[in-house]
Image (tube, grey):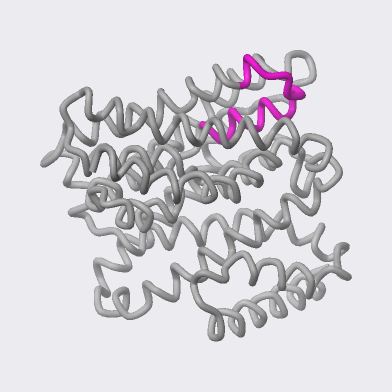
Amino acid sequence: MIEKLAGFLGGLFLCLETELEQAAPTEVFGIASHLCHVWAGKWEECAMLIDVALPLSLAIIMFSLGFGLTFADFGRVLTMPRAVIVGVMMQVVAVPAVAFLLVSFTSLPPAMAFGVMLLSFCPGGVTSNILTKLAGGTVALSITLTAVVSLLSVLTVPALTGWAATTFLGGDAPVINVTAIGISMFVITAVPVAIGVLLRFVAPTFADNNEGRVSALALILFAVIVAAALATNWSMFMENIGGLGPVLMALNAVLLIAGVVVARVLGLSGPDGLCISVEMGVQNATLGIAVAGIIAQTGGIPEFAVPAAVYGITMYIVTIPGMFILRKIFG
């Protein structure tokens, strides 16, 4: 098994290296599709690898987040407290609240509804900072919110997950070990972020020279994880896409609008509002998939991960045009 795992990892990262050298940033999902095709005949190895590759990939993605941060980014909590507090509360409280209202008024199967809630508990995604810049939002605030909420998620996600499992799965809910989930999340999210921040602090030149490569690798891994989650649950995806897709796109649109409207009502600037809007709309789908796997404890990628995988695609379809529309109105 170890030899198979080593061989598969070697082949995967060789493919990643080759594709990264040749591809443009806009080809991320094309690369993911190509990689899935390359390994289509090796699903036995894929199934074995998922339990290792999924948390490892999330750790690399979170490391890439920390690799782009400095201690000053955390210090903005003190220099711009109002915007940070509003942004954190909107992500930690408002996003799950909106998701709960939406799934409560739909007929999604319990597993899909639970998956949507898992997604809503996650912090902003790794691309939110880039999209905030394109939207004309406050990039410094975006970086700070991504960092702070990602670290807070170590506490918030396990606690909220237990409640959501009881609410939506009832007697079919798996045993939720909140402590175990919290420890797992700390290891695969907070620790890699801290390592990335410290590495940038001790070797800033190295970080500046390699940040682009690390970010590109993170995007590739994100796309591969989304593709793998859909592929391993393809029949369930096809059965539920008609109901799940519109719910997720509606959730995305409501979050984008709520973020900027609430921020403006509370007296924040247009750029700050656009930042909070994007941070709410772009979720860390990879974390949602990983947490679903931790909860299921069955190996591989469970059905709870399907909403996060679908949202990993639809959030760009909704957010990119949506943020430019909101920019014209509120920018």
Q: Which residues are magenta?
A: 103-120
What residue occupies the far left of the structure in this picture?
79
Does the magenta portion include 112?
A: yes
Taking the image as shown, residue 151 lies to the left or right of residue 248, namely left
Task: State how many labels appear.
Answer: 0
Q: Residue at x 55, y 31 (%)?
A: 250
The N terminus is located in which quarter?
bottom right
Question: Whole-percent x and y of residue 306?
Answer: 71, 41
Work out whether residue 15 or residue 307 is closer to the camera in this orientation and state it: 307
The C terminus is located in which quarter?
top left
Q: Is residue 90 above or below residue 78?
A: above
Question: Whole-percent x and y of residue 106?
Answer: 67, 19
Question: Whole-percent x and y of residue 101?
Answer: 55, 17
The answer to which quarter of the image holds residue 325 is: top left
Of helix, strand and loop, which mostly describes the magenta segment? helix
Question: Whole-percent x and y of residue 175?
Answer: 71, 24
Work out whether residue 4 or residue 32 is closer to the camera in this orientation and state it: 32
Does the magenta portion include 17?
A: no
Q: Residue at x 65, y 54 (%)?
A: 226
Work out whether residue 60 or residue 230 is closer to the camera in this orientation and state it: 230
Q: Residue at x 71, y 35 (%)?
A: 304
The answer to which quarter of the image holds residue 66 is: bottom left
Q: Residue at x 55, y 80 (%)?
A: 23
